[in-house]
Amino acid sequence: MSIEDKMTINERRKYLRKMQERYLQADRTSRGLLLDEMEAVTGLHRKSLVRLMKGNLTRQPRGRQRGHVYGPEVDGALRVIAESTDYICAERLTPNLTWLAKHLAAHGELTVTSQLLEQLERISVSSVQRILTHIRQDEPRLPRPGPKQRNRLLRDVPMKRIPWQEQEPGHFETDLVHHCGPTASGEYLHTIQMVDVATGWSERAAALGRSFLAMKDGFSRILTRLPFPVLEFHPDNGSEFFNQHLMRFWQRLTPRPQISRSRPYNKNDNRFVEQKNSTLVRSYLGYDRLDTVAQALAVNELYDKMWLYYNFFQPVMRLAEKTWIREEGQPSRVKRRFD
């Protein structure tokens, strides 16, 4: 029975109440035929139907409703802690709640009690996930980009997705974030962001405009402090990445990196860097227009501090295993295990 054809509990009980009168008045052979019909209609096991036919089909009201285990004090503490760690996921946040609460309390950002610390110590990942879901509801979403013109240089660059199982550092997803505000006219600031798939190492640099010199300076700033070489350069299909000058720049590097690109209109091919565009760029700079040299210098100073903080002090949780679970009559789901 498909999901669309399944009855709700109330619909099933209403149907069974109508069948119960016929069932109780029928002989043994007729009861067997009625059970066959009810089994096909409701999807219930035959033994369950026999028990239901002999009992009271009126649903009893629930005697006790589930209450809230954690009150507003825990919600408020999680809001402050989550904001201080840039809204990392519940799986990474939960094991660190207690010491983060004490640390924030020592700096006057949070008021803690022994009861609150005890609750933060025992709260489950699922409970933290539910609370964080409500906290994140007001976060703005990134706008969908429009279509882009085809570039002839793209013909020789393979389309692919860097596998999440990649073990070797150096395979970088790359993207460009526009700080143009409501209009894309004129010169304005861009953020070049690179994220390594294997380690989660992230790099950012601000560039004023998208000229070759601006992009070259931004990439040079990143390459000088990388702890390992770039083995693969994987951006989207933008002309700021695929032009003759910048292609020569990458080909002159030693070792020469492999160049690949994501499929057009498939943002999930660059899923790691797209997620960081929100958490590590937009959450700091927002959507306002930035178009001056002073702003570019200030943003690069900010990115220098973020480079130290996110690459050396933020915990990273890497996907270790992904299993598809398929059950008959149920939609497929993915079970993920993290290191």
Image (cartoon, rainbow, N blue to C red):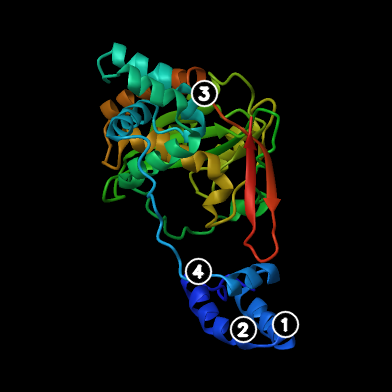
Q: Distance from label 2 to label 4 (Cα)? A: 20 Å
Mark 3 neighbour density, 10 Å: few (under 14) some (14–19) many (20 or more): few
Q: What residue is shown at x 39% (from left), y 53% (from top)?
A: 63
Q: Is 267 in front, or is 158?
A: 267
User: Which residue is more in the foreground, 330 or 38?
Assistant: 38
Quick one: SS at disc 3?
loop
User: In the image, 7: left or right of 142?
Assistant: right
Disc 4, SS: helix
Q: For mark 4, what is the residue?
A: 9
Quarter of the N terminus within the rendering: bottom right
Quarter where residue 197 is shown: top right
User: For the residue labelled by badge 2, is the local secondary structure a helix, a strand or a loop?
Assistant: helix
User: What kind of residue is marked 4?
Assistant: Ile
Q: Which mark is residue 23?
A: 2
- Residues under numbered marks 3 and 2 in contact, where contact means CB atoms less than 8 Å apart: no
> Which mark is in front, 3 or 2?
2
Pointer 3 or 1: first along the chain: 1
In the rendered image, which residue does mark 3 sit on?
315
In this view of the protein, can residue 209 be seen by the observer?
A: no
SS at mark 1 in the image: helix
Q: Residue 331: percent from the left, percent from the top?
A: 62, 61
Label 3 to label 2: alpha-carbon separation: 62 Å
Q: Is residue 27 above or below residue 127?
A: below
Instruction: Say the numbered circle drawn on residue 32.
Output: 1
Dot placed on the residue nearer the N-terminal end, 4 or 3: 4
Say whether residue 102 is visible: yes
Where does the C terminus fall, quadrant-wise?
top right
